[in-house]
Image: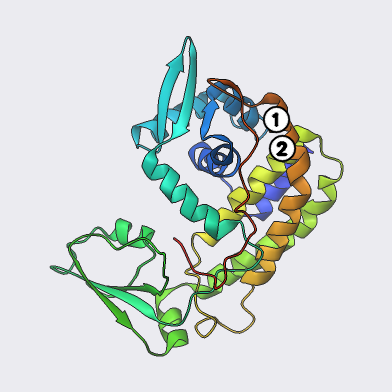
Amino acid sequence: MRDAINRFSDALDTTPVRAWSLIVSIYGDCVMPRGGELWLGTLTELLAALDVEPGSTRTAMSRLARDGFLERHRVGRTSHYRLSGEALALSRRAERLIYRTTAPTPPPGWEMVVTLPPGAADRKQLARAGYAALVPGVYARPHADDAPPPPDAVIRLTATGDDAALATALYPLADIAARYHGFITATAQITPYAEDADPLQALALRIMLVHGFRRIVLRDPHLSRDARPADWPADAAYRAFATLYRRLEPLSDSWLDDNAQNAAGPLPKPDDARRFCDPTPATVDM
């Protein structure tokens, strides 16, 4: 089964696996619905099933705490980590993007921002908010009613036009489509192994599934139907994700029920009723 998990990771193009990135996926998928806090010992055991050494886990946790993603507190000699307020908000947005049965489909139209002066705004912050550079100092993203607001020091505009042409100019759509196709193939290849997995193996497969899908979904600009290329594979990838996730969920949850701890003891049962309940009309969150 370890070889199968490694092949799954390779097929999902998640190698090299970075411990801090896996931890982000674990907190978003497993910890956030169960109170948001996890004992470091539980996390270390879980990451060991994914070939992450304890030293790498500790280093990654220190980095995430230093960067403000996690907050640490000690109970006696044990360390416990929970999502910071900002990280929780980001994880909630990602959750609404990931745990769906169909791809988000915003209405046609674009939001544009102009930086004042050109280049003054933080490009990484704009990218995290879903914007791509159209020309120097001008950024655009697909319209979305509940998308995060743009950074300060910008003029915000709305625009309409040739959605498909603008999308092609702004985003590497062929690369994103190829990643979706690769994900569909990888999930088909790993599905037979899910039948023979024990609880920890099922959880390891589930984490790699979420981790691989998250990396694609957060690159996808989630275009309106008018802006998408023909035969856009996102809906098929979302169906593949939802099907395999649901197959792995009962067994993998049993490992968390029996083994995962926070400062108060066993983790509570998951509060994940929002997952796979696609809103109508669907809107995009970055």
Give the spatial CA distance, label 2 vs label 1.
Answer: 6 Å
Q: Position of residue 18 (x, y in %)?
A: 52, 41
- Tag 2, which secondary structure? helix
Out of 90 and 229, give the one closest to the viewer.
90
Q: Position of residue 131 (x, y in %)?
A: 35, 67
Q: Residue at x 58, y 57 (%)?
A: 98
> Is residue 145 placed above or below 217 in the rendered structure?
below
> Is residue 267 placed above or below 87 in the rendered structure?
above
Kind of residue at badge 1: Asp
Q: Residues within 10 Å of mark 1 (few under 14, many from 20)?
A: some
> Is residue 222 placed above or below 90 in the rendered structure?
below
Residue that numbered label 2 is attached to = 253
Image-based side of 147 in relation to 257, left or right: left
Q: Residue at x 59, y 68 (%)?
A: 103
Q: Position of residue 226 (x, y in %)?
A: 52, 85
Q: Can residue 2 be seen here?
A: no
To which quarter of the image does residue 1 belong?
A: top right
Q: Residue at x 40, y 38 (%)?
A: 69
Image-based side of 91 in relation to 42, left or right: left
Residue that numbered label 1 is attached to = 257
Q: Residues within 10 Å of mark 2 (few under 14, many from 20)?
A: many
